[in-house]
Amino acid sequence: MLPILICCFVSLAIVFERLWSLSPTKIAPPNLIAEVWLSLKKDEFDSKRLKSLKDSSPLGYIMASGLTHSQSKDEMKAGMEEAASHVIHDLERYLNPLGTIASITPLLGLLGTTIGMIKVFSEIMIKGTGDAQVLAGGISEALITTAAGLFVAIPSLVLYRYFQRRIDGIVVQLEQQSGKLVDALHSGRQVDVK
């Protein structure tokens, strides 16, 4: 039971941290591209503003990387893709441990049940099957670990899948916003940056 309880607390910590960290407005502030475009059009973009943009959010980090490589469209895209890979890696932080917890806790529960059943059968060997109440109590106690393992695993797996899907949505949003900046800087057509 102790390993299952530890997994439960680790899973809860990861879930709360990811809920806090994966806020879409925190990752891609809604008006950031418009602010950057306005600063670029007014020619108010300097190294201080670039550093501020880089530190502001993950989207800002991607845009700042693109702007430092803005000599050509291809260089800008390459710089943004490299920065995006770092951002995606950060977004996926702690998801592997959450997935591992979802996978191992049923196995830990099954291990606990197996050990419990071994103890029950050892008692049967020593004392016989005369007292059915003791036998039933031992079996139910052994099954508690399986139930506990499943109780931790099921929500962990659901939340693991939820966070994966949420990250996929955020990545699409980051790609769209980054693409708008590239198009705005390197194409002759009008681009809506809002």
Image (spheres, helix red, strand yellow):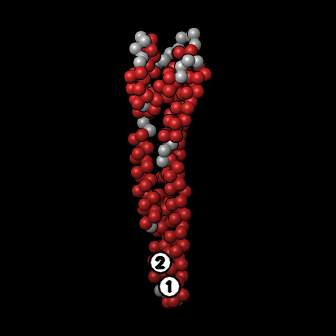
Depicted 178 relative to depicted 16: above or below = above
The relative height of residue 93 versus residue 65 in the rendered view (above or below) is below
Image position, residue 65 (x, y; %): 50, 27
Numbered circle sitting on residue 32: none
Q: Nearer the viewer, residue 135 or 62?
A: 62
Residue 21 drawn at (x, y percent): 42, 40
Please give the residue where the numbered disc 1 appears in the rendered image.
123
- Count residues near mark 1 (Cα–Cα under 10 Å), then give few for <14, some for 14-19, many for 20+: some
Query: Horizontally, is 186 left or right of 13 in the view?
Result: right
- On screen, residue 94 above or below 6: above
Quick one: quadrant of the N terminus? bottom left
Measured as percent of width and height from the top left, residue 82 is found at 55, 32
Tell whether label 2 touches label 1 (CB within 8 Å).
yes
Seen from the viewer's position, the closer of residues 149 and 18 is 18
Can I make out residue 193 in this image?
yes
Q: Residue at x 47, y 25 (%)?
A: 64
Q: Residues within 10 Å of mark 2 (few under 14, many from 20)?
A: some
**Number of marks:** 2
| Residue drawn 49% across the image and 51% down it | 98
- Give the spatial CA distance, label 1 vs label 2: 9 Å
Instruction: Identify residue for label 2.
Output: 138
Which amino acid does the dot numbered 2 rest on? Gly
